[in-house]
Image (spheres, coloured by chain):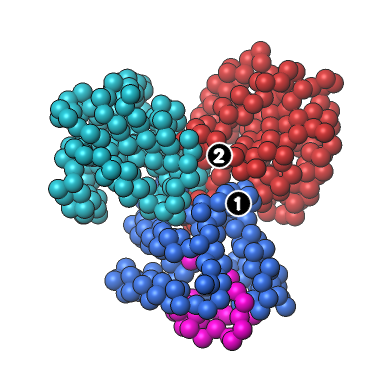
Chain colours: A blue, B cyan, C red
Amino acid sequence: MPKIIYVTGGARSGKSSFALQIAETYTNRVFLATAEPFDDEMEKRIARHREERKGKFLTLEEPVYLERILQNLPEGSGVVLLDCLTVWAGNLMHHFGTTSEIDRRIDTFLDQLSRVFCDMVIVSNEVGMGIVPENAMARRFRDIAGIINQKVASTADEAYFLCSGMPLKLK
Amino acid sequence: MPKIIYVTGGARSGKSSFALQIAETYTNRVFLATAEPFDDEMEKRIARHREERKGKFLTLEEPVYLERILQNLPEGSGVVLLDCLTVWAGNLMHHFGTTSEIDRRIDTFLDQLSRVFCDMVIVSNEVGMGIVPENAMARRFRDIAGIINQKVASTADEAYFLCSGMPLKLK
Amino acid sequence: MPKIIYVTGGARSGKSSFALQIAETYTNRVFLATAEPFDDEMEKRIARHREERKGKFLTLEEPVYLERILQNLPEGSGVVLLDCLTVWAGNLMHHFGTTSEIDRRIDTFLDQLSRVFCDMVIVSNEVGMGIVPENAMARRFRDIAGIINQKVASTADEAYFLCSGMPLKLK
């Protein structure tokens, strides 16, 4: 049975490095990137991360329809590192507003997640431990990101919370 | 000796669901709601939560004087689920500003908490793990909410931190 | 071998009190304060904290060049309580902008940290678990604070995450 390993934490908590370490114990690695560059800052960050993975991963980029990638993984893939669910949550809001289409996209992803033939390492972010945002869209984003986290984490076989670079085992 | 179970976590971390699960192992459940609806969004959220509990809990609502509810619990109550301390912290600020009356209210609540005849499950929020808010009121809120959390958690027999829907046992 | 104990958590999570408790098990205590008062609110907070430590610690204040203090500790010092790295991160940004001098200052500190002759208790903050700040400087601050946390925590012998006043052992 393929295994799902869930890795969450705050910004700069070391979650992506920890997930990379786990994924690098596999061969035939796929990196599924959800980030779309909206500005120069993101462009640079994405380029730097791509450079760090060079030669180690086949990188596939998909901001919205993650299930399409999971359905068509290269034969023999050993692991998929998906980074990250929170950026995906933002993309869903950007593309579909606040409609019920977001719920459908989440369900479709979860359904496909249960059919992937290789192990997955899935990175997410904790975004709900600051004060309540004044901006309604930010509150809605926090809700969507949190719901995705709960749903994906509940299907995971292992889960870790990263704090100052150190993993706490959640399950 | 009645037991106090403290449940904290970020927004959409699954803390309320986890607390509900614990409370539902009891009979004669009381739900003590602290939320006052300030706008439509809250009105809807409160109504949805009330619907979820229908038939399972006697719901009592009190935004400020929680000790009055705790003093007058229906005879035979098996558990009180209090949700949540952070909304209460906001209500205290709203009603009493930043005066020392807030400290008195907290002390009165803690005093009464130690006298409740049945078990309690108390939900709170982590609100201090984002960047420092620019707004002085938001900083003050963060301080009050954090102090309440520390004081109540220190009296608890069990405590859990929820992260992406999964509980980490704090004690 | 001197020991490094790392203590992190959100605002008002009880991290400073927990660190004080650890430090008070030593004799000849030094308190290394990084906070510079920018306004009345901070002035009061700093004064209150100084009052709490009176007679228990030799207090040394240094907002930027922490290594200078560590190089010149009073002979016979039993422990240094450094509070806190996140304020230091803010000071570094304030003094050096976003230049590479910040990286150099961090490296210099880490280098000196490995040479301190007595045990150290180091306090920091989790600031990356709220929603992404709209302000670019706030994002940069979050990055710097997070990187410092990871680097210092990785050198620590023990590490704790404080949540509602309760410590979770990270290592």
- Residue pointed to by mark 1: A167
Q: Is residue B4 above or below residue B10?
A: above
Image disc number at residue B21: none
Q: Please say if B135 is above or below A50.
A: above
**Residue located beneath label 2 in the image:** C168
10 Å crowding of disc 1: few (<14), some (14-19), many (20+)? many
- For the question of whether residue B43 can be seen, the reply is no
In this rendering, position of residue B160 left or right of residue B16: right
**What amino acid is at disc 2?**
Leu
Chain ID at mark 1: A
Q: Is residue B81 visible?
A: yes
Q: Are marks 1 and 2 on the same chain?
A: no
x and y, in percent, of residue C27 in the image? 73, 17
Q: Is residue B69 magenta?
A: no
In the image, residue A54 sits, relative to residue C137, either above or below, namely below
Q: Chain of mark 2?
A: C
Q: Tell me which residue sits at (66%, 79%) in the image.
A: A28
The three-letter amino acid code for the residue at tag 1 is Pro
**Residue in view at x 33 percent, y 74 percent:** A104
- In magenta, the rendered stretch is A58-86
Q: Residue at image x 44%, y 41%?
A: B160
* Snapshot quadrant of residue A150: bottom left
Residue A44: x, y in percent? 64, 69
Q: Is residue A81 magenta?
A: yes
Callout 1: SS:
strand
Q: CA distance from mark 1 to mark 2?
A: 12 Å
In the image, residue A126 above or below residue C85: below
